[in-house]
Amino acid sequence: MNYENYIQALVALVAVLGLITAFAWGARRMGWGGVRGAMRRDRRLAISEVLAIDNRRRLVLIKRDSVEHLLLIGGGDDIVVERAIHPGLPSGLPRVFEEIKQ
């Protein structure tokens, strides 16, 4: 048997797989992420921040459209701490002021 042909085929296979991997890495770096990249543009929901209170509970600030909501999750009950937080406005203002400000 001629082992040179097998070695040559194996080297060619490794080279082709390396080129495919390099192209995929470059495409991701340039923002051609495929389905995940396309979906990311249309997202309306995002997690802004997470703060661990203890081993079980966390405060999570989520953003929907341009409104943020503060949730306390874990521990047995999930609680909405504050809803309809508008970024840029001080918290605790009456709704009337928020409507006038908009």
Image (tube, rainbow, N blue to C red):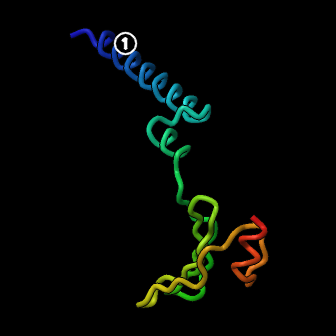
Looking at the picture, how far across and down is residue 65, in whole percent? Answer: 59, 58
Residue identified by numbered label 1: 8
Left or right, 5 with respect to 24, comes to left
Residue 53: name its quadrant: bottom right
Left or right, 12 with respect to 72, comes to left
Residue 17: name its quadrant: top left
Query: Which amino acid type corresponds to the residue marked 1 in the rendered image?
Result: Gln
Tell me the residue at 53%/59% (across/down).
45
Q: In front here: 37 or 25?
A: 37
Q: Quadrant of the C terminus?
A: bottom right
Left or right, 72 with respect to 17, comes to right
Q: Is 17 placed above or below 9 here? A: below
Q: Quadrant of the N terminus?
A: top left
Q: Is 34 placed above or below 2 here? A: below
Label 1: how many Cα within 10 Å (few below 14, some 14–19, many 20+): few
Q: Is 31 placed above or below 10 here? A: below
Looking at the picture, how far across and down is residue 19, in whole percent? Answer: 49, 22
Q: In front here: 35 or 84?
A: 84
Q: Secondary structure at mark 1?
A: helix
Looking at the picture, how far across and down is residue 38, in whole percent? Answer: 50, 38
Tell me the residue at 45%/20% (across/down).
15
Q: In front here: 67 or 51?
A: 67
